[in-house]
Image (cartoon, grey):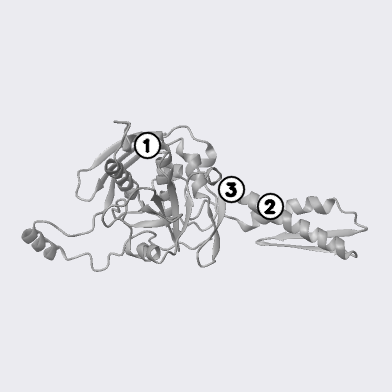
Amino acid sequence: MLKKRKNCGFPKLRNQIKPVRTALIVALILGSLSTPSYAKQLLFQRTGEQLNYVWQTGQNKPQQATFSLQQYPRDLSFFTAFRPHAANAFIAQGMLELAKTQDPKKAIIDIKAYGSRLSWKIRTRSKAEQVSLSQQLNTIYKKRYEQYLADHRMRIIKMPSGASGIIPDHPQLARESAKYLGAFAEHFFPKTSDNTSAADLKKQLDALLAFIQSIPYNTLQTKDQYRGAGFMTPIQVLRNNMGDCDSKATLLAAILLKAQPSLKTAFVYIPGHAFLAVQLPAQGDEETVKIKQQPWLVMDPTGPAIMPVGKVSEDTLRYIKSNYVKTLPVEDESEQ
């Protein structure tokens, strides 16, 4: 797995928090405080599939909303981390099927799967048979490995440095979860008119961002690695009221798919962090990432710092400026 950063998505706060007395003096002189704004959850209650929230963004008036989760399939209520021994057992099963078809007088295939290791040995007097069986086993390994990842909603990602790792298939999980988040889509994107201006759409996006940023941040690490260490599905984030960067980004992507299906969205990855980008025009100092040579606005729902559309932390911005990013579209890549 690609290692996650601690405080994933959090902006640096060094030299930004001033003593209360100094802040009060500045407030009296200037009439306002120049301090970071944070999204804060004031209340969360879950009764069955009813989710009740009270949250506050900065110094704004607290907001309250109750949402109903639609009936969702059980497999969207959990995510299991990658387990090498389980993957190897699945791959070995396919290899054993090939081994059983061999005439023991001509060739024998020994397969050993133990822990996180998988090995095989071919015994035959024919060099041509050795080559043929080796190619078949390698093909089985590749196909079964890819199948295991797909069955468990995972994928391999390769970063600009060439380093690769296994991550949750965030686009797929967003697509599968979107249909069950209609209440959230309707609340933050009410159908008041057929034509929503870019400015109004950004306000709606900011409101949704602030709500997700108010959901408590959690690194989601577990000792046994069996309960989805490092990731929660959108349904899990809402039901458990917690999430890390890629979990919250997937929730955001799923709601956007339901609310704004024509708005193109993509996941953006940098070392240890994940966020979103949307294909909207930038205004002023709003930050963008290049996707297929086009600028897309960034959206980071991690929190608790309020990051409106087009804003990210300084650490994240450095990776964007150096073009050290990997992007994945949320919509089905086969449809592009």
Residue 58 position, x and y percent, is 22, 51
Q: Residue 185 carries which label?
A: 1
Pointer 3 or 1: first along the chain? 3
Residue found at the very far front of the displayed protein: 293
Residue 210 position, x and y percent, is 30, 47
Please tell me whether mark 1 sits on a helix, a strand or a loop. Answer: helix
Residue to which mark 3 is pinned? 152
Relative placement, left or right, of 180 versus 154 is: left
Q: Nearer the viewer, mark 3 or mark 1?
A: 1
Residue found at the very far right of the displayed protein: 105
Relative placement, left or right, of 324 versus 195 is: right
Q: Please, is residue 285 above or below residue 236 in the view?
A: below
Please tell me whether mark 3 sits on a helix, a strand or a loop. Answer: loop
Residue to which mark 2 is pinned? 143
Q: Which amino acid does label 2 sit on?
A: Lys
Q: Residue at x 52, y 36 (%)?
A: 73
Q: Which of marks 2 and 3 is in front?
A: 2
Q: Which amino acid does label 3 sit on?
A: His
Whole-number angstrom distance, CA of label 2 to CA of label 1: 38 Å
Camera-nearest residue between 312 and 24 = 312
Please tell me whether mark 2 sits on a helix, a strand or a loop. Answer: helix
